[in-house]
Amino acid sequence: EAGVAQSPRYKIIEKRQSVAFWCNPISGHATLYWYQQILGQGPKLLIQFQNNGVVDDSQLPKDRFSAERLKGVDSTLKIQPAKLEDSAVYLCASSLGSTALGREKLFFGSGTQLSVL
Amino acid sequence: GIQVEQSPPDLILQEGANSTLRCNFSDSVNNLQWFHQNPWGQLINLFYIPSGTKQNGRLSATTVATERYSLLYISSSQTTDSGVYFCAVDRMDSSYKLIFGSGTRLLVRP
């Protein structure tokens, strides 16, 4: 079974530039998550989708971050414009979504390491 | 919000040794998961364990929900066990949001 796919693996940009990350969840997984992991810390949830609807985006900095999951499968996360403090690993995860939300095993992709100079 | 504290923050073991990692949480939870992040950054789900005890090979986990803690046991550690171990919980309300602890960094020396 294929895992969660993410691209690119690494990205280096200058501040004020824009960047986009792509995620394809495990086939059949209805719930998709984007997490931000700053060096030395645990992952922090940015946004959670159930199919193509947003369940939670309370910690997404909406002035610069946006995410979409138009067809309920793959998803993109965009940052525009990027700031130095956005340097982090951006992780995508998915879960089945067949039971009550938040009560399932999460499976993570390899992440995109973003460096903002 | 719910607080998740992991201890110890850092741990160095000799290959073959056993260890116990602890996760304390400040509120009742619906969901508790243990993850291993390897040195290349990949997060692997080890256990989904909101209560009770589970075992998988050399690893086992116990969650005592009424006392708000969970333990991860690693027996006969191997160098491939190195990495960061995270505990993540979902508060027992409608938030459905996994909150991660800051992790335990484990180094197993040959």
Image (cartoon, helix red, strand yellow):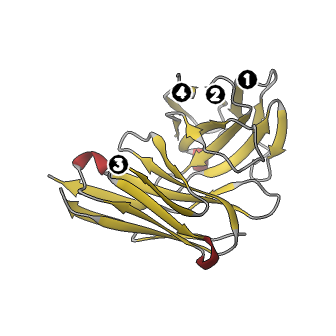
Residue wearing tag 3: B57
> Helix or strand or loop: what does disc 2 sit on?
loop
Subunit ID for the residue under disc 3: B
What residue is at 82 percent from the left and 23 percent from the top?
Answer: A70
The residue at which mark 2 appears reads as A25
Give yes or no for contact between labels 4 and 2 (Cβ–Cβ under 8 Å).
no
- Which residue appears at 23% of the width and 50% of the height? B78
Q: Nearer the viewer, residue A97 or A33?
A: A97
* Front in this rendered view, residue B14 or A8: B14
Q: Amino acid at mark 2?
A: Pro
Give the chain letter at badge 2: A
* Label annotation for residue A3: 4
Kindly indicate the quadrant of the structure image that contains residue A34. Answer: top right
SS for callout 1: loop
What separation in Å lies between label 1 and label 4 (alpha carbons)? 14 Å
Q: Which residue is mark 1?
A: A73
The chain letter under disc 1 is A
Q: Amino acid at mark 1?
A: Val
Q: Are marks 2 and 1 on the same chain?
A: yes
The percent coordinates of residue B102 (x first, y second) are: 51, 62
Q: For the residues carrying marks 4 and 3, which lies nearer the camera in this image? A: 3
Badge 4 marks a residue whose secondary structure is loop
How far apart in space, not on screen, are marks 4 and 3 (Cα)?
22 Å
Contact, CB < 8 Å: mark 2 with mark 1?
yes
Q: Residue B53: horizontal and vertical position, in percent?
A: 50, 61
